[in-house]
Image: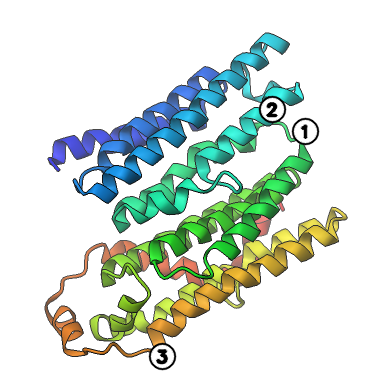
Amino acid sequence: MNPYIFLLLFSGLMLGTTITITSSHWLLAWMGLEINTLAIIPLMTQQHHPRAIEATTKYFLTQATAAATLLFASITNAWLTGQWDLQLMTHPLPTTMIILALSLKIGLAPLHTWLPEVLQGLNLTTGLVLSTWQKLAPFALLLQIPAANQELLILLGLTSTLVGGWGGLNQTQLRKILAYSSIAHLGWMLIILQFAPSLTLLALMVYLVMTTSAFLTLNLNNATNMNSLATTWAKAPLLATLVPILLLSLGGLPPMTGFMPKWLILQELTKQGLPLTATFAALTALLSLYYYLRMSYAITLTIAPNNLAGLAPWRFFQPPFSLLLSLATLPALLLLPLTPAITALLHL
C-alpha cells in the first residue's frame, strides 16, 4: 500500500476514535464510529485475498448494523426525553438498544459470531488493530452511559466469559483462539462496568498490553496455527521461553500481570454481594486457561518434524516490531507487584 494512503487511513482511524472518545453528543459519537469503520476497511483489504475480502465484508455488515441500531436508539432517546447528551440516558428502551449495539460493535457474546471469522481472514498486524484499537471507542461510550440496566451488563459479561472460554477449546487456528480470548476478556470488563468503571479501565489497559504482545509474538514467528508454534524454539529461542509465560498471563495466573484485573474484579464483585457471579466468572476463566496451556505446550514441549526448515529464519530473519514487542511484553508480565500503586492511582 502507498505510504501516503496508509498515513491517511491511519490518521482517519485515530481521528474517528478521538472524536468518539471526546464527544458528549450522540450524533458526534456515531460519526466518530463511522469514520473509524470506514478507515479500517481499506487496511483490511490490502491483501487482495478472498479470505480478506470475505472478512472485510462481514465486518462492514456487522458494523453497519450496529451503527444503524445506535443511531436509531439515540434518535429514540432524543424523541422520548428531548436529550442528545451521552450522560442523560434516562429511558430504559434506548439505553438497552445502545448497549446491545455497542456489544455487537466490540463482539460481546451472544453477538460475537462475526469476530472469530473476521479475525481469521486478516493478517496478524491488522488483527492486532482490530482487537485493540477498535475496542477503545465503543468502550468509551459504554463507560459514559449511566448504568441503569445492571442485569443486562452482568448477563452479557458472564455470557462472554463463558463463550470466550468454551469457543476456543477446540480451535487450532491461533487467530480464532485470540478472538475468543478477546471475547472472554471483554466479558470480564463488562461484568464490573457499573460497579467500578476505573477497574474496567484498568482491565482494558492490561488487556491491550497483553494482546499487543501476543499478536506481535505470533507475527514475529509467522505462526497462524497450533502446529507452526512448534518451530518457535528454532526461530527465536528467547521468545520460546517468554511466550508460555505471556500466555499464562493472558490466562490470569499469578504472579503475572494478567492476574491483577481478575483478582480485583473478583474482590469487587464479592464486596458488591455477588459471590455467585464471581464464582461463575472464575470458573469460566479455567476454560480459557486450557487453550492457553495448549499453546504453551505446543511451543515448549513439541518439536517440529522438520527442524532444518526452522533454522534459516533464526539466522537470517530480521524481526519487525522488536522494540514495540519488548515494550509490550515487559508490562504484560511484570506489573503485578505494582498493584497497590496502580489501585491508589485509579482510586480503587
Q: Earlier in the sequence, mark 1 or mark 2?
A: 2
Q: Amino acid at mark 3?
A: Leu
**Where residue 60 appears, x then y in whole percent?**
38, 35
Q: Secondary structure at mark 2?
A: helix
- Is 10 or 293 nearer to us in this picture? 293
Dot 2, how many residues are within 10 Å of its Cα: few (below 14), some (14-19), or many (20+)?
Answer: many
Which residue is tagged 1?
A: 148
Dot 1, how many residues are within 10 Å of its Cα: few (below 14), some (14-19), or many (20+)?
Answer: some
| 146 lies left or right of 111 | right
Q: Amino acid at mark 1?
A: Ala
Above or below residue 11? Residue 258 is below
Q: Amino acid at mark 2?
A: Thr
Dot 3, how many residues are within 10 Å of its Cα: few (below 14), some (14-19), or many (20+)?
Answer: few
Which residue is tagged 3?
A: 301
Which residue is tagged 2?
A: 95
| 311 lies left or right of 90 | left
Work out which quarter of the rendered image holds the N terminus and state it. Answer: top left
**Where residue 348 appears, x then y in whole percent?**
72, 53
- Is 115 or 209 nearer to us in this picture? 115
**Where residue 258 appears, x then y in whole percent?**
57, 67
